[in-house]
Image (spheres, helix red, strand yellow):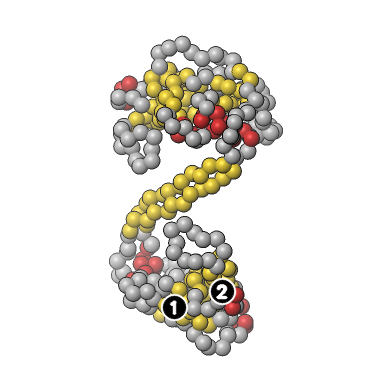
Amino acid sequence: MTDVLSAPLVVEFPFTRSLGPVQSAFLTGLRERTVLGVRADDGTVLVPPVEYDPVTANELRELVEVAATGTVTTWAWNPSPRRYQPLGTPFAWVLVRLDGAATALLHALDAPGPDAVHTGMRVRIRWAATRTGAITDIAYFEPYDGESGPAEPAAHDGEFADPVTGIVAPARLDYVHSPGRAQSAYLKALAGHRTVGERCPACRKVYVPPRGACPTCGIATAEQVEVGPRGTVTTFCIVNIKAKNLDIEVPYVYAHIALDGADLALHGRIAGIPYDQVRMGLRVEPVWAEGAAHPDHYRPTGEPDADYDTYKELV
């Protein structure tokens, strides 16, 4: 029985998006210590503002300014803040309905403990010392016992100098990945510069990487079959945009490669040949970097190209 592998895995990337007129006004307003909402078709004010009415789907453009004070509608205590969260000490996640708004805004509340937080408590915005036009311009909410803001928000044209037109939001997911029995065996074989798949007992197809079951027959697979190491390029793309933290010069080729003896193509980078000479049917072999647990790339073998009929089912 193969020991199942397990390892921490991090998926992280910067998410870049442009802003329409409503979101641009909202984020630029935060930079200027102004909270803007948008009036919906039924007259209610939505904060944060949205571009389309959630009921009628009509486009919304009527911006209004709401108060920096509000009421907690619900909350949850966070005893162990994580990296990049608003506060480094324990705090409460709160939904706050700002005075003049009909919906609630999610943010952090700085409080000494969960006993100090309750639904219905009054709070106000604590602005960040340095503001750039992001939700983090609200550093956090804090308890407030002063007067309420105006119930009727004031009209606002949404015009500011140097408006924010785009944002970059870092996305990160940390988790422990367990590849399962079949892929654990596959990864361990790769560490020994071998590629192992599994054969379906019904259709007899060999799947690489193995999935533990045949995707066509739905039958569990257990028979291990070593394939490759050589294979055939079935299809490919030319990458022209350099990925952050990836030390590969563009353009380069990323391909589907059907290893000899396999009935499923896997992914791999093609090198050792000009990118504009890579083609379907090109015969390739793996190149391993010293100490690597998987092939660094595939290079041409020098063999004649494979006939299309030999790999057409794997394109």
Residue in view at x 55 percent, y 76 percent = 274
Label 2 secondary element:
helix
Tell me: residue 125, above or below residue 226: above
Where is residue 31 drawn, in percent x and y?
A: 51, 30
Mark 2 → mark 1, Cα distance in angstroms: 17 Å
In this rendered view, identify the residue nearer to me: 121 or 158: 158
From the viewer's perspective, tell me whether residue 89 is left or right of residue 46.
Answer: left
In this rendered view, identify the residue nearer to me: 32 or 266: 32
Residue in view at x 36 percent, y 22 percent = 117
Give the residue type that dot 1 points to: Pro
Q: Quadrant of residue 25?
A: top right
Tell me: residue 271, above or below residue 113: below
Please report whichever mark, 2 or 1, sits nearer to the chain's N-terminal start.
2
Q: What's the mark number on residue 13? A: none
Which residue is disc 1 drawn over? 286
Which residue is disc 2 drawn over? 275
From the viewer's perspective, tell me whether residue 289 is left or right of residue 309.
Answer: left
Q: In which quarter of the image is residue 213?
A: bottom left
